[in-house]
Image: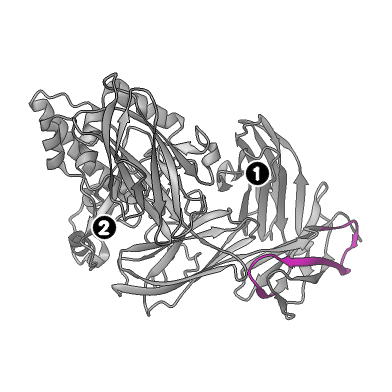
Amino acid sequence: PPLNDGNNARAELYTRLIDTYGVQLVISAGNDGPGVNTIGDPAVADKVISVGASVSKDTWAADYGSVVDTKYAMMPFSSRGPREDGGFTPTLTAPGASVNTVPTWEPGAPVAEAGYALPPGYAMLQGTSMAAPQATGAAALLLSAAKERHHALPPAELRTALTSTAKKIKGVQAYAQGAGLIDVNEAWEAIRDGVSVQEYAVKAPVKTSLAGSLKTPGFGTGLYDREGGLKTGENRTYDISITRTTGPDRPIWHELGWKNNDGTFRIVGDDEVKLPLNRPVTVKVRAKARTAGAHSAILTVNDDHTWPVDKQILTTVVAAQPLAKPSYTVKESGSVQRNATTSYFVNVPKGAKTLEVAMSGLRSGSQTRWIAISPYGVPADPTSTPNCYPNYPNPANTCRPELRSYADPLPGVWEFEVESRRTSPHLDNPYTLTATALGVAFDPAERTIPEAKAGTPTTVSWTAANGFAPIEGALRGGQLGSSVTDRPTIKQGETRTTKVTLGAGVTRLDASIGHVSDAKADLDLSVYKDGKVVASSTKGDSEESVSLTKPAAGEYTIEVSGYSVPAGSTAYDYRDVYFAPSLGELRTNTSQPIHLPSGAKAAVTAEVIAASAPPAGRALFGEVQLQNATGTVAGSGAVKIEKVVG
């Protein structure tokens, strides 16, 4: 979910299970990476061990037939932290590829390019679901050894031993690997020597798109500044409050330090702090991002008289590049190695209609793609390993590897992660990535024609104002649709449904909701046919839309759900519309180019030709789109025909 802060019923359940029964839960971090803040439930609970997936150079070669230079790295798909509240996730990292048993009647399933065969009943698998069992097995070994020596090893001591002895993976940021690669031998040494555990509460500033929805708005269990506008080279100081909640009823000196710090973070003032029991103490941390992008480190808080490290606090800041005037474009060139990733962070301004991303400059045969991750840490593209690589078969055949656009992008810091597949024929893969913010506003947004005569053209016009990147393109129309609009009210937990019956020949069904009166409401939208979900939109806000292309004839149910309505109830805009050639068309002159610099305005026109009247209770609806030279929509205007006469 977008709000992956660990403040939910399942996370609370896991915490109670661990505390009540003394059984440590070990959870896969997820496979939505490698973007920042892509970790999700159930790996975000406070006391679980969440495990990221790593891989060695030797494993790439032996199991996948893929040659790399880097000795050890994260699997590209492994979900990264931090939590939305800055929390320390993933906890640890473990190998994320292994030979696994499958049903014995299934043939062996090696990776095709590895060049060997496994016997029936075995398969080569990869994922954080491979890493978590390896970490679980390591923890079981430690528990077994402790039991043999009559040594109590409660979950808190087990976690502390593992996180304090984990080994840093060189070149991998803290938000990606957590405490580091699990080391069973070192963890056992710590346990055998005695692990002292004290508990601490942390209150650190969080500046993200969802920071206002945290348990304590604007604060969390780690420092996370994504949306604060931090600039490259800027010094920024953050106050982190630390409270020792267990241990002696006297102040204890703690040493402050850093792990996995690339030089971005430092302590302001003394590197020692005296922590009384149950009284907060403020530690000042200064961040200076020398390069654009994400930077993270682990702030260690350690009582010198105990071992191992008492508290580890994740700190993460992002210095993003603005999509700003006059070009509203960010263009980056680089090179990424096979199986490796790199990321760019771009601040998308409010009001953009479309975010267009293009990749060019690839070497012949290169299998290099990008994945867009929204400010919520939610990937806007599928992250599975076969998806959307050029020069590689895309299983869905629905993705354009060289150019994609994201309609109505969330304002804020987007991440564009570039990666080269394990099967790319080149070790080094050059590329150029270009992100552009488009936004042309039509005035009025919707024209209304009270009455139109069937078959007779009616001229309609708008003023198009360009507030973003310059446009060289054309105005395009299309089929008319049958629409219904409403402004209903929905309560917390309530669902509202609308039935729509489609006949043969319908080319598209769209449904959308938005413009809620309760700005904090989270409404979800789903479309059902024959009792099954055929489309849904469930982002962390209430601006939801779905579209079905060439839907089968029959009855559809469009459901709006009041997932979260803090005000108790909220009004919202609703529209559904289905398009068919039998209803008519909105005709434009596509041969007439439109040149619209940033900040410019122009009058645009189209002709409405209604072919037949819509069903009772519905109106005819049409839309014109201003598209740039690549076909990306920069803005649109609508027209509504209330009545059609013969």
Q: Which residue is drawn at 24% across and 67% down?
A: 68
Q: How is the image coloured?
A: one colour
Vertical side of 439 occupied by 1: above or below: above
Vertical side of 591 occupied by 113: above or below: above
Q: Quarter of the image holding residue 146? A: top left
Q: Residue at x 42, y 31 (%)?
A: 10
Q: Quarter of the image holding residue 64? A: bottom left
Residue range in magenta is 447-473
Q: In this view, does 338 lie to the left or right of 289?
A: left
Q: Position of residue 593 (x, y in %)?
A: 72, 79
Q: In which quarter of the image is the C terminus?
A: bottom right
Q: Is residue 519 left or right of residue 129?
A: right
Q: Residue 73 carries which label?
A: 2
Q: Position of residue 63 (x, y in %)?
A: 21, 60
Inspect the image, locate mark 2, and give the three-letter code of the amino acid beneath it: Ala
In the image, which is nearer the foreground, mark 1 or mark 2? 2
Q: Would residue 107 be visible to someone looking at this image?
A: no
How far apart are the two marked residues, 1 and 2, measured between alpha carbons? 45 Å
Vertical side of 492 occupied by 270: above or below: below
Q: Is mark 1 on a helix, strand or loop?
A: strand
Magenta stretch: includes residue 641? no
- Which of the pair 366/616 is nearer the observer? 366
Inspect the image, locate mark 1, and give the three-letter code of the amino acid beneath it: Ile
- Residue lying furthest left: 149
- Residue lying furthest front: 269
Which secondary structure type mostly characterizes the magenta part of the structure?
strand
Find disc 1 in the rendering and name its residue: 558
Q: Is residue 578 left or right of residue 190?
A: right
Q: Are marks 1 and 2 in contact (CB under 8 Å)?
A: no
Q: Which residue is drawn at 23% across and 68% down?
A: 67
Vertical side of 427 occupied by 518: above or below: above
Q: Would residue 3 be visible to someone looking at this image?
A: yes
